[in-house]
Amino acid sequence: MQTGPRNLITDVSGLRVGNASDATVKTGVTVLVADQPFTAGLHVMGGAPGTRESDLLAPDKTVQQVDALVLSGGSAFGLDAASGVADALRTQGRGFAVGDQTVPIVPGAILFDLLNGGDKSWAENPYKDLGAAALASARVDFDIGTEGAGFGATLATRKGGLGSASMVLPSGHTVGALVAVNALGDATVDDTHFWAAPFEIGDEFGGHGPAPSALAHLPPTKLASHNTNTTIAIVATDATLDQSQCTRMATAAHDGMARALVPSHTPMDGDLVFAVSTSEKPLANPVEETLWLGHAAATCLARAIARAVYHATPHPGDTLPCYR
C-alpha cells in the first residue's frame, strides 16, 4: 500500500480541512467540508460521547447527506462550534432546502480539554467564532499536531493532537483519516515506540518500529482525572457508498483506534468515528471492495493517531510534554 500525495484526508478528492485555535484557552476547532454535500455515517464506541445532529446519520433517517463535519474541543461548550459553521454555510447558500429556507446540515463531536492549563474563564463561549474561522480557513493542505480540535488534547503521559493519514488501494480508491486524539490511555508503549508501529508507512511517525515487547503491567491512563478524555475521528473515501455502507466503514475504522490507543473505547472516553463518501468512484465489486475500504480506514486511523502525537508541539502553560 502507499499513501496519497499529501498523506492527509484531503487526498480524497474534493475534501478540504480548516483549523482554528485559541492559544490562551488551549483549545480549537477542525472542520471538514467539500464543494458539494457528502454522504456520512457514524459509529460510537466510547461510553461518554458528546455530539450534535448525530441521530440523523443513521441509515433510516430522511437526510442522507451533510454539508460539513465539525470536531471541537471544549466539551459541551464546543458543540456551539457547529453553529458558527452552519451560519457561515447558510450565507453561502449551502444546506438542505425546505421551502424558501436553506438549512445547513452540520453534525459535530466534542472532546474534553477544559483542564489542560488554558484559561477557560471566558465571558462568552468562543466556539461559535472558532467554528466560523475554521471553515473560512478550509483548504487542501493543512497542518497536523497541535492544531485545531487537537490543540489542547492530552493523553496519559504526553500531549495529544490532530492527526491525518491516507492510503491508495489497488482498486484505485483513496481512503483518509482525520482525528483529534485526547484519550484516557496512551499512544505509546514506552517513551519511543507507538502501538500503531506495525501499520506505519515509511517513517511517518519516526520509523522506530514495534516495541521489543508489550508491557506486562497495565498501561498508564488519565484515570485520576477520568472525565478529561475522548478521541474523535473522521474517515473518508472517494468510493461511492450509501449511508449504511458509510456506517459500516465507520464501525470497521474503530479497529484502528484500538490498535493505536491502549486502552481505548473505555467508559470514560467518548470515542467515535464519522465516515464520509464523496461518491466519485463507483465500486466494481461492492462486497469485496467495501471489506478493503473498512480495513484501509482502520489502518489510516491508527496511523493518523500516531502522527497526531508525533507532530505535537510545546506551548506555554502545557501540563504535559510532547513526544518530541
Image (cartoon, rainbow, N blue to C red):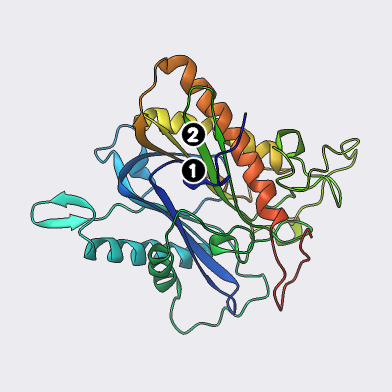
Residue 237's quadrant in the figure? top left
Residue 37's quadrant in the figure? top left
Q: Identify the disc placed on residue 317.
A: none
| Residue drawn at (35%, 63%) of the image | 85
User: Tags 1 and 2 in contact by the CB under 8 Å rule?
Assistant: yes
Q: Quadrant of the N terminus?
A: top right
Residue neighbourhood size for the residue with mark 2, other residues' Cα within 10 Å, grouped as few (<14), some (14–19), many (≥20): many
Q: Is residue 54 visible?
A: yes
Name the residue beneath numbered marker 1.
Answer: 11
Q: In this view, does 115 lie to the left or right of 262?
A: left
Label 1 to label 2: alpha-carbon separation: 7 Å
Which mark sits nearer the N-terminus, 1 or 2? 1
Q: In this view, does 253 lie above or below 76?
A: above
Q: Which amino acid does label 2 sit on?
A: Thr
Residue neighbourhood size for the residue with mark 1, other residues' Cα within 10 Å, grouped as few (<14), some (14–19), many (≥20): many
Q: Which amino acid does label 1 sit on?
A: Asp
Q: Is residue 52 visible?
A: no
Could you tell me residue 169's position as x and y percent? 54, 27
As helix, strand or loop, the secondary structure at mark 1 comes to: helix
Q: In which quarter of the image is the C terminus?
A: bottom right
Name the residue beneath numbered marker 2.
Answer: 174
Q: In this view, does 260 lie above or below 323?
A: above
Which of the pair 38/26 is nearer the observer?
A: 38
| Residue drawn at (51%, 21%) of the image | 291
